[in-house]
Image (cartoon, rainbow, N blue to C red):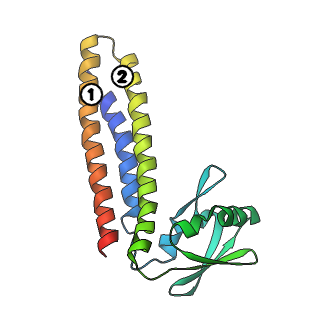
């Protein structure tokens, strides 16, 4: 049985976890700044965008930012869906911009910010599950003998279980950090 085929598949799945960690490892609720706001994902018409890709973020003061949108449609969609309000931010519409205020660190605000991480975690967990299904079918096509297929599936599923466990642990650590800062 050739292990390299499976190892490459496992690396693809591990990259999902690594990307999640890189994106949110510096997420600091006490110091929400432009860099943190840039990484917030907003859903517009079934597509997800980083906030930095749809608007220019300017600092008004330590806890207040001005978001100037590239397209009025983005602004309208965010206002309609309460995208930023759902994360706990207080917003005021000013012409084609939004003034975003970061509230004090309450338990409610922490939980809403935690939803950002949770949503991304669930999206990535779903990606991992889709890869699992795809790779299991590829294993059946790649290997010819039943023994090799069974061994490859066992090896792959064992590694996948460890990756999922690690990913869950990372999410729990991020969550605890946000709730306890």
Picture residue at 40% right of the left edge, 55% below the top: 20
Label drawn at residue 130: none
Label 2: element kind: helix
Residue 52 visible here: yes
Label 1: element kind: helix
Residue 23 visible here: no
10 Å crowding of disc 2: few (<14), some (14-19), many (20+): some
Name the residue beneath numbered marker 2.
139
Foreground residue among 102 and 20: 102
Foreground residue among 90 and 141: 90
Locate residue 5, reporting x and y percent. Answer: 33, 28
* Disc on the earlier residue, 1 or 2: 1
Picture residue at 45% right of the left edge, 67% below the top: 112
Cα distance, mark 1 to mark 2? 11 Å
Name the residue beneath numbered marker 1.
3
10 Å crowding of disc 1: few (<14), some (14-19), many (20+): few
Picture residue at 61% right of the left edge, 65% below the top: 82
* Quarter of the N terminus within the rendering: top left
Quarter occupied by residue 128: top left
Locate residue 52, reporting x and y percent. Answer: 59, 67
Locate residue 135, reporting x and y percent. Answer: 39, 28
């Amino acid at each position: 049985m050739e292990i390299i085929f499976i190892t490459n598949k496992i690396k693809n799945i591990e990259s999902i976890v690594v990307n999640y960690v890189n994106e949110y490892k510096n997420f600091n609720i006490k110091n929400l700044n432009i860099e943190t706001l840039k990484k917030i994902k907003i859903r517009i018409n079934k597509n997800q965008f980083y906030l930095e890709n749809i608007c220019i973020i300017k600092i008004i003061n330590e806890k207040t930012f001005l978001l100037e949108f590239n397209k009025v449609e983005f602004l309208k969609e965010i206002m309609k869906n309460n995208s930023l309000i759902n994360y706990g931010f207080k917003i005021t519409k000013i012409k084609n911009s939004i003034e975003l205020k970061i509230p004090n660190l309450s338990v409610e605000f922490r939980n809403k910010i935690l939803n950002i991480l949770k949503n991304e975690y669930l999206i990535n967990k779903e990606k991992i599950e889709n890869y699992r299904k795809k790779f299991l079918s590829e294993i059946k096509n790649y290997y010819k003998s039943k023994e090799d297929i069974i061994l490859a599936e066992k090896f792959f599923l064992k590694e996948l279980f460890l990756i999922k466990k690690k990913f869950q642990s990372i999410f729990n650590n991020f969550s605890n950090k946000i709730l306890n800062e």
